[in-house]
Image: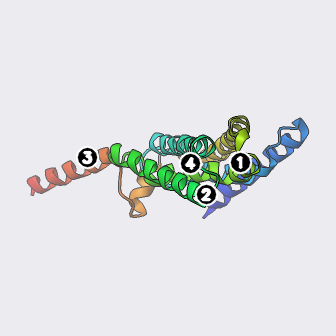
C-alpha cells in the first residue's frame, strides 16, 4: 500500500513539474501531461514480461498507430469506412507483431502504444488530415516525452523488472523464469 502511495505521489509531482516547465518554457505539453505520465507509469508498473518487452511493445504500437494515421491521410478516404479500415489494420498489425514475437512482446503493450498516439493526436489529426506529417511529429514528441517522465517516475519507487511481482499476482512468468522453475521442480522430484 505504501509503495502505491509513494508511486502515486512521485508520479503526481512529475506530472506537475511537466505542466509547470511546459508553461514556463512554452513547450505545449499540458494537454498530454496526464495522458503520457499515466501511460508511462502503466508500462513501468504492470508486472508482465520484461521491461524491455513492455517498452518494445509500447514503441512498436506507437509506430504502428503513426503508420495508421499516415495511411488514413495518404491512402484512405476521410470517412467512417476509411477510419474503420485504419483501425482494423492497426489492431491486426499489433496482434501480428505479438504473434510473430511468440508473445514475448505483450499484446496489451502494443495496444497501449497505439492508444497513446490515438488519444493524444486524434483531435489534431481530425482538424487537418492533410497536415499529418507536420502535426504528428509534434504530437509524437510531446507524448513520448511525457510518457518517459511517467515511466521514470514509476520506476524510482518500483523495481523495473516486475517478474517476481507478476508470479505472485498470478500472472504468467517470463519464459526463462518458467523453465528454471520447471527444472527446479524436476530436480526436487528426482531427489525424493
Are the residues tagged 2 and 1 within 8 Å (C-beta)? no
Label 4 SS: helix
Comparing labels 1 and 4, the label whose residue is closer to the camera: 1
Give the CA separation, mark 1 to mark 4: 17 Å
Label 1 SS: helix
First reached walking from the N terminus: tag 2 or tag 4: 2
Q: Give above or below for 132 relative to 103.
A: above
The residue beneath circle 1 is 125
Comparing labels 2 and 1, the label whose residue is closer to the camera: 1
The location of residue 92, given as percent across then percent down, is: 43, 52
Q: Tag on residue 180?
A: 3
Q: Tag on residue 113?
A: 4
Q: Residues within 10 Å of mark 2 (few under 14, many from 20)?
A: few
Q: Residues within 10 Å of mark 4 (few under 14, many from 20)?
A: many
Are the residues tagged 2 and 3 within 8 Å (C-beta)? no
Quadrant (top left, top right, bottom left, bottom right) of the N terminus: bottom right
Give the CA separation, mark 4 to mark 3: 31 Å
Most extreme residue toward the right is 24
The location of residue 22, given as percent across then percent down, is: 84, 41
First reached walking from the N terminus: tag 3 or tag 1: 1
The residue beneath circle 2 is 3
Q: Residue at x 67, y 60 (%)?
A: 5
Are the residues tagged 3 and 1 within 8 Å (C-beta)? no
First reached walking from the N terminus: tag 4 or tag 3: 4
Q: Give above or below for 169 relative to 66.
A: below
Left or right: 67, with 23 as reference point = left
The location of residue 70, given as percent across then percent down, is: 60, 41
Amino acid at each position: 500500500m505504501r509503495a502505491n502511495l509513494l508511486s502515486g505521489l512521485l508520479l503526481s509531482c512529475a506530472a506537475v513539474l511537466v505542466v509547470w516547465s511546459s508553461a514556463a518554457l512554452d513547450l505545449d505539453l499540458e494537454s498530454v501531461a496526464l495522458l503520457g505520465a499515466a501511460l508511462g507509469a502503466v508500462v513501468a508498473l504492470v508486472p508482465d514480461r520484461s521491461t524491455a518487452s513492455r517498452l518494445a511493445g509500447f514503441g512498436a504500437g506507437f509506430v504502428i498507430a503513426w503508420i495508421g494515421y499516415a495511411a488514413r491521410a495518404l491512402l484512405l478516404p476521410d470517412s467512417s469506412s476509411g477510419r474503420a479500415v485504419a483501425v482494423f489494420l492497426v489492431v491486426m498489425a499489433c496482434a501480428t507483431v505479438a504473434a510473430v514475437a511468440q508473445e514475448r512482446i505483450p499484446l496489451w503493450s502494443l495496444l497501449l502504444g497505439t492508444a497513446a498516439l490515438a488519444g493524444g493526436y486524434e483531435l489534431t489529426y481530425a482538424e487537418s488530415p492533410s497536415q499529418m506529417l507536420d502535426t504528428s511529429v509534434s504530437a509524437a514528441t510531446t507524448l513520448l516525452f511525457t510518457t518517459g517522465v511517467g515511466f521514470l517516475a514509476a520506476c524510482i519507487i518500483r523495481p523495473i523488472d516486475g517478474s517476481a511481482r507478476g508470479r505472485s499476482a498470478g500472472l504468467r512468468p517470463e519464459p526463462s523464469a518458467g523453465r528454471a522453475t520447471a527444472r527446479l521442480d524436476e530436480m526436487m522430484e528426482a531427489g525424493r
